Amino acid sequence: MSWSQVVGQNEAILTLQAAVADAEKLTRGEPGPAMTHAWLITGPPGSGRSLAATTFAASLVCAEGGCGQCQACRTAALGGHPDVYIEIPEGTEILLDHVRPLTQMAAQAPMSALWRVIVIEDADRLNDRAANHLLKSLEEPTPHTVWILCAPSRDDVLPTIVSRTRHVGLRTPDVEDITQMLIQDCGVDETTAKFCARASQGHIGRARALATDPETRERRQQCLRAPLNLRDLPSCVSVAGEVFDAASAVADARADRLDAQEDELLKSRFYAEGVTRLTGAMKRSHDSEAKELAKDQKRRRKRLVVDEVDRVLVDLIGLFRDVLIVQTDAQITLINEELRAQVEQMAAGSSLEQTVRRLEALEHERRVLFAGGSPRTVVEAAMVQIKDPSVHSAHAR
Ligand SMILES: [Zn+2]
């Protein structure tokens, strides 16, 4: 975990690094105006806002101000540091019950580091009661507590929260920044890097996966071919099934990897060298943490499926955006330049109005997905509306 992984966000990184430097001064009783106790980090999905938030959190609990190497830096983002807590919401709303333990935590002094850091990913999902409860904690900060809230944009968060936090905005990283990162970090050639950067549409995690995993590239191609295979309703359902299964397989693989890392970390904290069995208070404490961890992991697994299905929708939106570009004869590089033949075929075989409807339908399904709709049903609805774009206008929005 280090700042070099936060791509194309130099300005934001400088702000947060200055805050880390001043945070240290504050603990020595010197002025540190670049630091404050409540932050709001905004940025579109995939721009790296949660990575920026967790790197900032790790830097605040690292003795070196974010060396990227030490135990604190390596474990903070995985929930392995006692002074860093990361709230990852499962559902569409963060409820009062979720926030109350956080404000209790915020009221306590840090255990081992100079700061106690609480990160809320998706602060846009705080419901009103939860947000109001949080406000009190933001208004009357405990000296060594830092809140880091993340959201897509400032408009997504209550104004009262915005006014009590310092804002750091991330932008959508551009194709050039992502290309350079892929060449340096993933060791791919320039052509591949450019393709992956374009195809990711500014989503860093997606760009990395495309660059390093041939299966991800293949599945993306499969998904983009899906519109060609929609002949009738049964074929929509079966194509949707294939696309959904592929997406959830990716999500599961990621979840398995993260779960294994965390399980290992938990084990290493409780089992000393040569110990095979825990007893008494040690066992109770381990079991209760293991139970909590299992709950969090289950939540994350669901969320990763939602994220993957969203990628499918974003890929399809990119494809129909390309169709629109060809249909309107706009002189812009296609996202899917390598699929130009297919895009031109689709453009010739449909009207501009149909393309616009398809794009609207796909955007609508993204909103349904994030409002808690079943991911499988969302993919089915997307396929049906791609097949017949007049369906959507027929049912109420
Ligand atoms: Zn460190």
Image (cartoon, grey):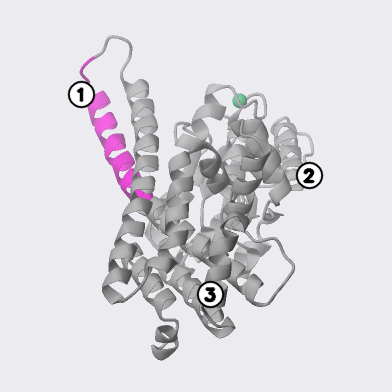
Alpha carbon separation for disc pair 3 and 2 = 46 Å
Please indicate whether residue 50 sits to the left or right of residue 89 in the image: right
Question: For residue 72, which quarter of the picture?
Answer: top right
Give the mark nearest the N terminus, 2 or 1.
2
**Residue highlighted by disc 2:** 33
Residue type, label 3: Leu
Quadrant of the rendered image holding ligand 1? top right
Residue type, label 1: Gly
Give the mark nearest the N terminus, 1 or 3.
1
Numbered disc 1: secondary structure: helix
Alpha carbon separation for disc pair 2 and 1 = 47 Å
State whether residue 287 appears in this view. yes
Q: Position of residue 11 (x, y in %)?
A: 77, 47
> Within 10 angstroms of label 1, few (less than 14), some, or many (20 or more) residues?
few
Question: For residue 252, which quarter of the picture?
Answer: top left
Dominant secondary structure of the residues highlighted in magenta in the image: helix
In this picture, is 84 found above or below 230? Answer: above
**Residue highlighted by disc 3:** 359
Q: Which residues are magenta?
A: 276-302
Q: Position of residue 294 (x, y in %)?
A: 29, 41
> Within 10 angstroms of label 2, few (less than 14), some, or many (20 or more) residues?
few
Please indicate whether residue 200 sits to the left or right of residue 172 in the image: left
Give the mark nearest the N terminus, 3 or 2.
2
Q: Residue at x 75, y 32 (%)?
A: 25
Q: Is residue 206 magenta?
A: no
**Residue highlighted by disc 1:** 280
Q: Position of residue 364 (x, y in %)?
A: 47, 75
Residue type, label 2: Pro
Looking at the rendered image, the quarter that the N terminus falls into is top right
Q: Position of residue 2 (x, y in %)?
A: 62, 32
Is the residue under label 2 in contact with that under label 3 (CB below 8 Å)? no
Q: Residue at x 43, y 58 (%)?
A: 223
